[in-house]
Image (cartoon, grey):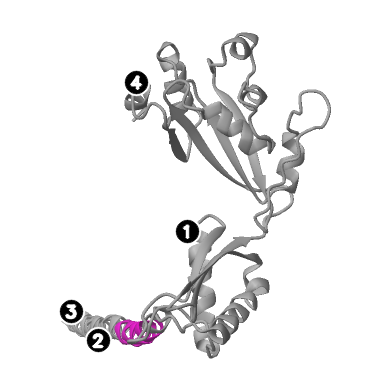
Amino acid sequence: MTSQTSNNINLSATSDQSSNMATNDGIQTFAEPTVARITNEVEDQQSDAIRQYLSKKIAWISPNEEQFDALVQLLKKRLDEGHGETILEIGTGVTDGECPGLLNDEMEASVATLKSMQTVLDSEVQLLREKSVSNNTRYISEYLIRRHIDQEDFMEVRVAVTGNVDAGKSTLLGVLTHGLLDDGRGIARQKLFRHKHEMETGRTSSVGNDILGFDAQGAIVNRPDTHGNQALDWSDICQRSAKVVTFIDLAGHEKYLKTTVFGMTGHAPDYAMLMVGANAGVIGMTKEHL
């Protein structure tokens, strides 16, 4: 009897302890999400205020420390989304009843704020274009922000060039990549041709490639060899480039449609450029490529 009674007491004590532990765990489990929810609400209130500030056109003029950090985070996010580059427009946004654009001194202050972030963002800032509004009293500017890339690395964008035969695809790429104008007899397109019959007929029959390199400031770094056929040194271009655009020159003739489809799918382009001849319009293989 004594042994049975002691066992009952121990079991009772154990059940009380487990009940207390369950209660404590329940309070702790309930308290943790409550604290997290309150913290998130405070952060949401702060982010809403910052978000409203960032949407204003005056956001870049004279930000305080918190606003400056928010602007840096905004650009970091946009650089990540843009794979190392983004275009920022200064002078647009919520105007609070004012005309769009910034006055000259406001624009200078905004640009100074942007350029002060170059070191923090490890990037280059380059003016793309500026336009005046409100009778030339206010200005809107677009800036290219490009992150510095390691010397052995660069950003690459692949563009597949499609269109009907004789639309001028190879000619345009020859002008862009070699920096020379066409002479009306096909000198530009011959820079991309790889086969003798292509030079004789003037039509692309295979998948061709050529590159266009840009440095951190947005300047073109292509330097065709002045000797021989003025070929491009791809390794030299890649070493001096922060961004490389690879053009995939595709055949436009119906006879080479399978080759064109292979080039569009096998080279994994990021974009497709459709060339339309001004003298012919959307005809033939242009519709097939669409």
CA separation, marks 2 and 1?
51 Å
- Rounded to the nearest angstrom, the CA distance separating label 3 from label 4 is 98 Å
* Picture quadrant where residue 185 is located: top right
Crowd around label 3: few <14 · some 14–19 · many ≥20 (10 Å): few
Q: Residue at x 61, y 60 (%)?
A: 146
Q: State which quarter of the image contains the N terminus.
A: bottom left
Work out whether 142 lies above or below 66: above
Q: Residue tagged by mark 3? A: 4
Q: Secondary structure at mark 4?
A: loop
Q: Earlier in the sequence, mark 1 or mark 4?
A: 1
Tag of residue 81: 1
Q: CA distance from mark 2 to mark 3?
A: 25 Å
Nearer the observer: mark 3 or 4; the answer is 4
Q: CA distance from mark 1 to mark 3?
A: 71 Å
In the picture of the structure, the residue carrying the numbered disc 4 is 284
Tag shown at residue 102: none
Q: Which residue is mark 2?
A: 20
